[in-house]
Amino acid sequence: MAHRSPLAGDPALLALGAAVRRIREAKGISQERLALEAQVDRSYVSHIETGKNNPAVLTLVKLAGAMDVSVADLVAQAGL
């Protein structure tokens, strides 16, 4: 079970999560499919998208790969 990050709600996490959601939805990918392809729990994807979790770099690599974007593009779309 994913634990809530002490950084939950941090503006950078909120921006990153919003970017993940925007890209995922623009590509027509469900949270379930993204989670399966990135090998993480669906609830973890939800927590990332809502800024409740601080994903590890490897998780960002997996999520970006599953959405066919680079981590750099993901971070740039978050405005970070």
Image (cartoon, rainbow, N blue to C red):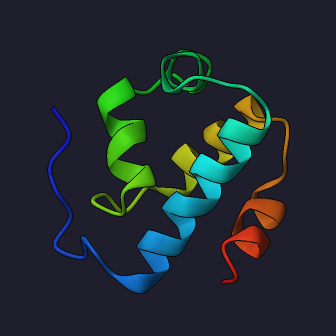
Q: Which of the pair 59/48 is nearer the observer?
A: 48
Q: Which of the pair 11/41 is nearer the observer?
A: 11
Residue 41 seen in render = no
Seen at 83% across and 63% down, the residue is 73
Answer with left or right where residue 60 lies relative to residue 8: right
Quadrant into which the C terminus falls: bottom right
Seen at 75% across and 69% down, the residue is 77
Q: Which of the pair 16/25 is nearer the observer?
A: 25
Seen at 63% across and 60% down, the residue is 19
Answer with left or right where residue 33 lies relative to residue 8: right
Question: How many numbered marks does the figure carry?
Answer: 0
- x, y (%) of residue 72? 81, 66
Q: Is residue 6 above or below residue 61?
A: below
Answer with left or right where residue 26 lies relative to residue 10: right
Q: Is residue 44 above or below residue 50?
A: above
Seen at 58% across and 27% down, the residue is 38
Quarter residue 71 falls in: bottom right
- x, y (%) of residue 6? 16, 73
Residue 59 seen in render = yes
Answer with left or right where residue 29 lies relative to residue 56: right
Q: Is residue 34 above or below residue 47?
A: above
Quadrant into which the N terminus falls: top left
Q: Is residue 31 above or below residue 51?
A: above
- x, y (%) of residue 3? 14, 48
